[in-house]
Image (cartoon, helix red, strand yellow):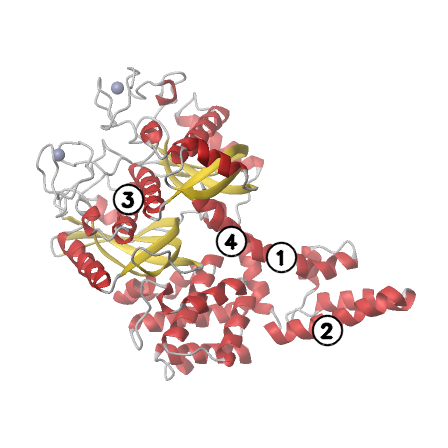
Amino acid sequence: MKLRVRLAEASLLVPLAVAALWSLPALARGGGGEHYTSDRSGPDGGGADIGILFDLLYLAIRYPVIGVPLLLLFVGYVIYSRRQSGNGSTRKALERMDEQQRTAVSAADVHAWVNKLKAEDPAFDLLALFDKTKKLFLDVQGAWFRRDLKPVRPFLSDASHQRLSTQLKLLDSQGVRDALTDVQLQDLQIIGLEQSEWFDTVHIRVKASMRDTDVPSTFSDDQAQVAAKKAALAPFVEVWSFVRKPGAQTKIGEDLYQGKCPNCGAPFEGGASNACESCGAVVNSGNYDWVLAEITQGMEFQRNDVGVEGLAKARQTDPALNSEMLEDRASLCFWRWVEAQSLSKASVLSKVATPEFQARLDAELLALAAQHRRKVFLECAVGSVQTRAVQPVEGMDFAHVEIRWSARLGLGPVNEKPPQLPTVPQRWVFTLTRKVGATTHAEAGMATNRCPQCNAPASDNASTSCEFCGAELATGEHDWVLCDAVLWEEWRASTSSRARPGANAQVVDRSERERLLYMMAAMAIADGVVDEKERALLKMCSQRWNVPWANVDLALKAGPNLFERLVGKQTPEAENFLRELVNLAMIDGKIDRREKKMLEAAAVHLGLSQQLPGMLKV
Ligand SMILES: [Zn+2]
Ligand SMILES: [Zn+2]
């Protein structure tokens, strides 16, 4: 699917070019690799440069015709790069952290994971799971291409189905369809297993390639294929996450892949209800067999290892409450929220959000429509979904779920092509609410879009109640509904206990740095013209934080509408934001002159110039 492929390309291309440049001196030295460079570099990062200098001096004496020009070039490069990025130690510290976050898997890991699964399910076989993954992968591409998800519906959790269906609608609303061909799967690897009381989650890395391109939505399948053939073959990596209830047993030859109910083995014909006609089992619940819960880009994949504040306490009254289902439900709400805004139709949320939330969104969309503008979410993708806290307040339970996503986001005139926009990482917290005393609907499992009273699948209409039994769905009487969606900074600022410093340990990965930088750029633009001095500071950040400058430049051109919202001046969330910037600058243990200037500029935009010196002291 191009949505993801393109995102990966956009963010990979520039760093690769930069990496190629960077590695040139190392290659010339011969035998010098990354480790050599980082081992030799002292605290000021100068060691490697000196090593190359000696090599080049030798070359210049021995073969002056080649060596002298190379030496001059190198000296020029060192001076230039020093001026551009200071001593570069921030950048090196960040690169090391990125490295550690990448998914490395040993044969021993794989062996251990498989054994853990076999302990409860002796018939489990990794190769058989790979075969299923391969079939599903190809079927999903085919269903996506034909714009008909019915054939793969029983294999997807409700949120992953919602995501694909929303993405198809967004493409259609722009008058295009995704034409793809020559889909090839190169490699499958298990890269993680998470086990909780409620679900086992298996992460499978998929390496594949395909040709794809945008064509008018009126194109037939044949016309679309012809167009796709002309596109370049592009490789991509995704992580497919499958979820299953612990204790579920592999049934060889008796599952959905053979057209059989994974619970009772009766023939399963499909159909909108997604439930077996013989035994009533919800086939995509994850209670009987693996169900696809999420597709993540390789780069954005993150291990889910944070504890959830308040979850254990909430389980005392609702023992089946679990973060997997909450996250699936939050993800479902997220995609509905994206769809509602892109199509300017708040009623898309009628069954999954509170009437108040819907009314607020409706008012926002009406105000935009009055200005003949609309919200644009292009190439929207979710990076990670993580439950942060569960807490009861005055008769209602609240679950706060962090969603990291990215999109080319902006405001565009109605019925016109949106402006050229960069892909911007976003970090939000979606808050779901439910009446205290309501309990988790365990039979539906990862099928989180069903009526909690009669178990029927929730239909797509604008009504707020179940069309089968009349149960009211939007009030949170029985199931979690969306009641708020705010920026990460706003959420952090709303409760002081969450502002504890430990929470910052996570902010330094690449998409987070990218997000902070774009926010700084957007705030600078919002305050008026961005002068050369300020551009230079942003450029320095882009180099130190390893974010492609071309994207930042695009962000500066796109204007302040790059974000749904910005943090307000002189607010607690502005303080959180500035503190994150300080932490980032401190990652190498110090703040140098240029970093200080950058922080001062940011503090001006945040209205926090007086608070900054206090933050730098701590
Ligand atoms: Zn059955
Ligand atoms: Zn119902």
Please say whether residue 369 is visible from this viewpoint: yes
Q: Where is residue 113 shown, x and y percent of the image?
A: 47, 34
Q: Is residue 614 above or below residue 60?
A: below
Rendered image: mark on residue 76: 2
x and y percentages locating residue 9 in the rendered image: 52, 50
Q: Quadrant of residue 37?
A: bottom right
Circles 4 and 1: CB atoms closer than 8 Å: no
Q: CA distance from mark 4 to mark 3?
A: 26 Å
Indicate the amino acid at tag 4: Ala
The residue where tag 4 is placed is 10
Quadrant of ligand 2: it is: top left
The residues tagged by marks 4 and 1 sit, at their Cα atoms, a distance apart of 12 Å
Q: Residue at x 51, y 67 (%)?
A: 587
Image-based side of 447 in relation to 171, left or right: left
> From where the camera sits, is residue 58 visible?
no
Q: Earlier in the sequence, mark 2 or mark 1?
A: 1
Q: CA distance from mark 2 to mark 1?
A: 19 Å
Q: First in sequence: mark 4 or mark 1? A: 4
Q: Vertical placement of 67 versus 109: above or below?
A: below
Answer whether labels 4 and 3 touch (C-beta < 8 Å).
Answer: no
The image shows residue 314 at horizontal and vertical percentages of: 21, 47
Return the residue at label 3: 332
Amino acid under disc 2: Gly
Q: Which corner quadrant of the image does residue 197 belong to? A: top left
Pick whichever, 176 or 458, lies toward us.
Answer: 176
For residue 477, side relative to residue 491 (left or right)? left
In-front residue for pair 411/574:
411
How far apart, in angstroms, are the residues tagged by discs 2 and 3?
53 Å
- The residue labelled by disc 1 is 17
The amino acid type, in three-letter code, at marker 1 is: Ala
